[in-house]
Image (tube, rainbow, N blue to C red):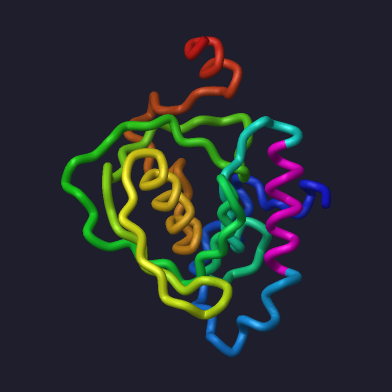
Amino acid sequence: MSLDKLLLLGDPLLYEQSERLELSELKGLKPLVKKLHEILMAFRKKYGAGRAIAAPQIGIHKRLIYLNIEKPQVLINPVLENKSSETIEVWDDCLSFPELFVKVKRHKRCAIKFTDIKGHSQSWDIEDDMSELLQHECDHLDGILATQRAINSKSFKHRAGIYTRIK
């Protein structure tokens, strides 16, 4: 699967709010999940990064996140709760703008409730990297990009500039 299905920064479709997925739609999700998996793997191969992708990033405005860190997982209709007042600053990256990093503030901890691909309710307490990641992906479901959450006008760096400083 090529990366040409991935919507890029500036595409107006990225700013649209997604609709809830109905349980009746669960049986038909396999092709969408397969497409999200293939795009995420193609992105990893090209950029050496990528942990998750939200359906709106390929123009499907449904509340679904495909996560693949230790194993593939599908989060349907995720809701963030119990957001900590403590925040962390991170250089956020995104499949929709692969050469750009944006410094944002995210909640250090929160909980996420969702339905899995089998229709079971799940709830995770998450913190640090996972909290940041899933806040980012939930933002996609609401039509919000990390660029809109930038701390200030100097919170943008090209990918090459980030890796030069990290090394």
- Specify start and end residues of the magenta stretch as a single range: 32-44
Q: Is residue 37 covered in magenta?
A: yes
Which residue is at 83% across, 52% downward?
Answer: 1
Horizontally, is 151 left or right of 8 in the view? Answer: left
| Relative to 25, residue 148 above or below | above
- Given residues 163 and 110, the one toward you in this image is 110
Work out which residue is located at the far front of the displayed protein and give it. 70
| Relative to 147, residue 113 above or below | below
Residue 26, given in percent of the width and then of the height, sits at 61, 81
| Relative to 164, residue 147 above or below | below
Work out which residue is located at the far left of the displayed protein and give it. 85
Q: Is residue 13 covered in magenta?
A: no
- Main SS of residues in magenta: helix
Quarter of the view holding residue 90? top left
Which residue is at 56% across, 54% downward?
Answer: 67
Residue 136, given in percent of the width and then of the height, sits at 44, 49
Residue 122, given in percent of the width and then of the height, sits at 40, 69
Work out which residue is located at the far bottom of the displayed protein and give it. 24
Which residue is at 40% across, 39% downward?
Answer: 129
